Image: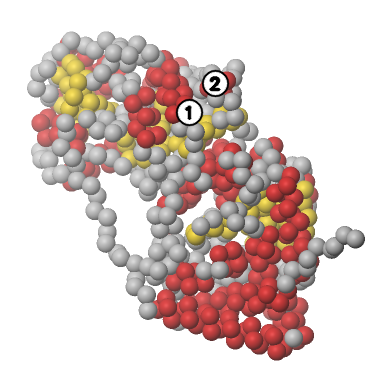
Amino acid sequence: MAHAPAKPDLSELYRKAFLIRETELRLLELFTQGKVNGTIHTCVGQEFTGLAVAEAMKAGDLVFSNHRGHGHFIAVTGDLAGLVAEIMGKASGVCGGRGGSQHLHKDGFYSNGVQGGIVPVSAGMALALRLKASDNICAAFVGDGTLGEGVVYETLNIASKWSLPLLIVVENNLYAQSTPQSQTLAGGILERARAFGIEASAGSTADPGALVEAAAAAASGVRSGRMPRLLQVDTYRLKAHSKGDDDRDPAEVRTAWDRDPLTLYAKTDSRKAAEFSKAAKDAVAKAVAKAESSADPACAAEAPAAPRPCRWVPADLSSDRTVVALINEALARALEDDRRVVLLGEDLLDPYGGAFKVTRGLSTRFPGRVFNTPISEAAIVGLGNGLALQGLLPVVELMFGDFLALAADQIINHASKFRYMYGDTVSVPLVIRTPMGGRRGYGATHSQCLEKHFLGVPDTELLALNCRVDPGRVYAAVFKAAERPVIVIEDKLLYAMRLSRPVAAGFRWEHTDERIPCARLRPDADPDLTILAYGGMVPHAEAAAEALFDEHDLAAEVIAPVRLSPFDPGPLLESVRRTRRLLVAEEGVGFAAFGSEAASRVLEAGISPFSLKRVACHPHPVPSASPLEKAALPGPGHIISAALELCHGE
């Protein structure tokens, strides 16, 4: 005779629910007392969601939560003391006080406060599990309000198409902050998942036992079928969205309190409820006392690195390979040498091999490691984030640099934040490579130089390849030191160029002897001015330097950094100290751009007297017609005119 599956221990479940509730209520008190900095989003009324899902998790499973994740954290990790200390901003917190209430990490538990963006990150972690042939799964918690975010649907599509072991848990509390669901949600929640071929089911915190069974069934389906599922959990938030911002009908809230499972439990088993409540209060009081006696985090500011002395060596420009071929070879070497490397992007697979043929042949040589994605830039980068958090080394290609704008949330609010806000307990070895720039007639939305918008993003390296530094050397350095996000800008026109292009008589190219080299076009004569250029502007600066020498008897030294952010101004300062004249040439719009930062570094270094000119794109969208585009984008002629004005006032 078959035995029915064991029923969950509801007594133990209620004990944990009382602990979560007491924790949340005490945190609200601590906030009122000024002992918590920032904000608090409590899950009072929603405790059984995290508990039910935690019951279905196994060792090695991954969980990604959101801004309302305290209950999830306690249910999954059991680390009450670490949570309380973190929210109270103590060094003993799980993230050393850096993350606070919304940004938690311990073992396989993660959370972030930006709505929607955690879903593709979770899918990336699920993809990592699949690639590792693990039988573990990943669960992601979102609220019903998050269903307004488009990246959720990008991810549902990919998760279904790629058979990712991802359980998406939608806590349906009927409100997005203050806005009722009736004003924002069209159709049903379950139907949204089913539209992507994803099985979807529902449960409710009103029936904790049934919810545990529903969560177990959903998780088991993901685990055995290696397919995503969605679990809708109907619930109600009994406290304000955060602290005291509650405009809901008080009668509605009172009714919800009367129906609350813990309220009802106290009526049906008052002795047990009192026992659980007292134990919870004692445990929370102990955690608070421990946190209050703990040290605050160290507040030593990180001083910016001083410019290093420059050691210049002759540039090796012997390769007759094109830049695109050298990048392709670099990616092939990375795939060959490191099993962690995977490539993701649109149209990467053979026979197409990418819009600019950078990945041609790689999917054939390395089957299962190059992925064609839908047109879903935010989700693609989010997948990369999740893969990176799980120890892989993803290389994400965005077909055009203009599309970085579509992935900005994943770069700025996720990739760049994880390492620091999780207390240096994770690394994010994510590489994003993308072609940038105009001069091909592609018009306003496929010709921009948007790199300035990513300058200074914390913990993120921004590189711009040029035609006088071997891109293979740059990528080898990136892969070798992969710990943090790196954005690599590849100018479209450079792809067809060769390192071995002739250098004008009277000039020589040199490189700094460092991980990511800076290039310098050095004149044999004493230089009269310094030209700072990067990426696609380097060949234009080189041509201008040659013309200035041949036609105007002016010797220009070109400084061509590859690493734009963080920026080491050492090579630039060394040159400007000699010339006292700086001309910055960049293809993008000049306002608040790299040239501004470079000029400020020269001023901060106290170099005086010092003269400056800047050459940049006209401050309007890049036009498509050839004569208009040529007039809008700076070239050698613009640089020459600015140089003459700088040196002679002409």
Q: Residue at x 49, y 36 (%)?
A: 340
SS type, badge 1: helix
Which residue does the image show at 27% across and 62% down from the upper left? 300
Identify residue type, mark 1.
Answer: Leu
Asked if disc 1 and disc 2 are in contact, CB closer than 8 Å, the reply is: yes
- In the depicted view, which residue is nearer to us: 75 or 177? 75
Name the image quarter holding residue 170. bottom right
Could you give the CA–CA distance between mark 1 and mark 2, rounded to whole angstroms?
9 Å
In the rendered structure, which disc, 1 or 2, sits on the residue that comes first in sequence? Answer: 1
Left or right of 576 in this view: 565: right
CA neighbours of label 1 inside 10 A, class few (<14), some (14 to 19), many (20+): many
- Residues 42 and 437: in front is 42
The x, y position of residue 301, in whole percent, is: 27, 59
Position of residue 84 measured from the top left corner of the image (x, y, whole percent): 48, 72
* Residue 365 circle label: 2
Image label count? 2
Residue 591: x and y in percent read 34, 39
Quadrant of image for the N terminus? bottom right
Q: Is residue 303 toward the left or the right of residue 552 in the image? A: right
| Residue visible at 35% across and 14% down in the picture | 498
Q: Is residue 29 left or right of residue 4?
A: left
User: Toward the viewer: 266 or 510?
Assistant: 266
Q: How packed is label 2: few (under 14 Cα within 10 Å), some, or many (20 or more)?
A: some
Element type where label 2 sits in the image: helix
169 shown above or below 329: below
Label of residue 335 in the image: 1
